Image (cartoon, rainbow, N blue to C red):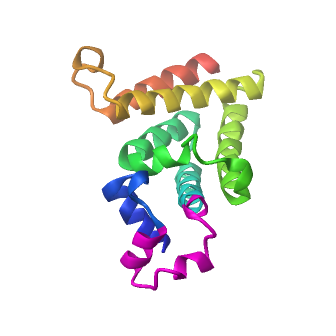
Amino acid sequence: MLAAAGELLVEKGEAGISLREVARRAGVSHNAPYRHFPDRDSLLAALAAEGFDELSERSRQADELAGLGQCYVAFALEQPGRFALMFSPGLDKSRHPELQAAALQLFDLLREAVRQAAPKRDVQIATLAAWSLVHGLSQLLLDRQLSETLLGEQPADALSEQVTRLFTEGLG
């Protein structure tokens, strides 16, 4: 059912996901999703948690803070619907412990990368700065707010690399 919901997310966005449509897409009875998810929000929280888990897994492959930031931006651009869902203000993380845990796991990876890159900095503030930078850059790119005048001829991955490296150098 999560795979079916993920397909709907890509095709129709968060608004296009209903338990009935997920059941139809998964080839099960329209009541079957309720055995796993008490409501639509629980299904959306599970999809968002999967996104955090995937991003955490990808982030573990990064060898440094700048690489982790580049991974974050790449994920956002590759999976804009999932990214938007992960940070949706409509999903209350306190109601969905698995979502809260998945989000915290990603934050902890970032915090550890910051701690290694800048051991003399206040880790909480530096982590918030790093997250703000990559999340803001991701959102600017997704919302097409960076004109060619600002971007030049650079593709998004090259821009992401330059921005994250500049930040990391300044942090250290």
Is residue 1 or residue 90 the one in the foreground? 90
Q: Total of numbered circles in the picture?
A: 0
Q: Is residue 166 above or below residue 58?
A: above
Residue 56 seen in render:
yes
Position of 63 with respect to 123 (left or right) is left
Position of 17 with respect to 103 (left or right) is left
Quarter of the image for residue 34 reads bottom right
At 53% from the left and 25% from the top, the residue drawn is 133
Q: Is residue 133 above or below residue 113?
A: above
Quarter of the image for residue 102 reads bottom right
Q: Does the stretch in magenta take in 30?
A: yes
Where does residue 114 sit, x and y in percent of width and height?
67, 32
Where does residue 33 sit, x and y in percent of width and height?
54, 76
Position of 171 with respect to 148 (left or right) is right
Quadrant where the C terminus lies? top right
Write down the region rendered in magenta.
19-43
Q: Is residue 36 above or below residue 121?
A: below
Q: Is residue 34 above or below residue 56?
A: below
Residue 62 seen in render:
no
Where does residue 75 sit, x and y in percent of width and height?
44, 46
Q: Does the stretch in magenta take in 48?
A: no
At 70% from the left and 34% from the top, the residue drawn is 116
Quarter of the image for residue 158 reads top left
Q: Examine the residues drawn in magenta and state their main secondary structure.
A: helix
Where does residue 90 sit, x and y in percent of width and height?
57, 44
At 30% from the left and 15% from the top, the residue drawn is 150
Is residue 134 or residue 120 the one in the foreground? 134
Is residue 165 or residue 81 the one in the foreground? 81
